[in-house]
Amino acid sequence: MEDLYRFERELLNQNITLIGGIDEVGRGPLIGPVVAACVILPPNYELDGLTDSKKLSEKKRNHFYDILQKEALSIGIGIIKEDIIDEVNIYEATKLAMKEALKNSSLKPEHVLIDAMKLDLDIPSTSIIKGDSKSLSIAAASVIAKVERDKMMYELDQKYPMYDLKHNKGYPTKKHLEAINEYGIIKEHRKTFGPVNKYLERNKK
């Protein structure tokens, strides 16, 4: 079993107790925002079964989301919409979402653990490759960000059922691509992403 508290424990041993985990979801979809979360857990926190949101069922994610909403010391959310993604590119937009999540945190962490990305911050940070399956704080952030973005996709699905966003969450699935070809695109689509951009090029007047 992976020790999901190793990085946090090292910091606690240095008397650093406000440790933020930062992660994002939504880099790959063709539609909607990229969403990040910054979560500060209580020292020596345990939540059995919590791990990278991609490894959890939706039911489990929602279960952990509800627990974290009650038990986390602080949760900050960062949302960068599709127009900014198109303007600055998804990599830069991901960094902006992470920084916004940190800024929206009610407590300022003394140190942040970040999934993969390196951020230019005014507080110490550690970037961890595959951090969402190596750090409990990052795993918590991945669950919060995933559930928050999924809620947005469900709302969008209600308005635009033809894209079947409740089942593909905006990823370039066969059904989503077929729907773009048949119904066109909506303002929430990312215009610079391959399939959307190809559709726009084909349909230039």
Image (tube, rainbow, N blue to C red):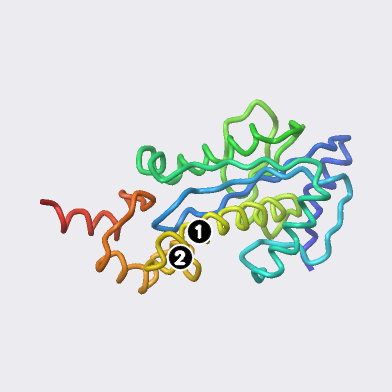
User: Does residue 158 sit above or below 98 in this rendering?
Assistant: below
* Percent position of residue 44, x then y: 89, 49
- Dividing the picture into quadrants, the one containing residue 171 is bottom left
Query: Regarding mark 1 in the picture, which secondary structure is present there?
Result: helix
Neighbor class of circle 2 (other Cα within 10 Å; few <14, some 14-19, many 20+) is many
User: Does residue 195 sit above or below 106 in this rendering?
Assistant: below
Q: For mark 1, what is the residue?
A: 153
Residue contact at pointers 2 and 1, CB within 8 angstroms: yes
Neighbor class of circle 1 (other Cα within 10 Å; few <14, some 14-19, many 20+) is many
The N terminus lies in which quarter of the figure? Answer: bottom right
Q: For mark 2, what is the residue?
A: 165
User: Does residue 110 sit above or below 59 in this rendering?
Assistant: above
Query: Regarding mark 2 in the picture, which secondary structure is present there?
Result: helix
Q: Residue furthest bottom?
A: 174
Q: Is residue 51 left or right of residue 149?
A: right
Residue placed most toward the observer, 126 or 26: 26
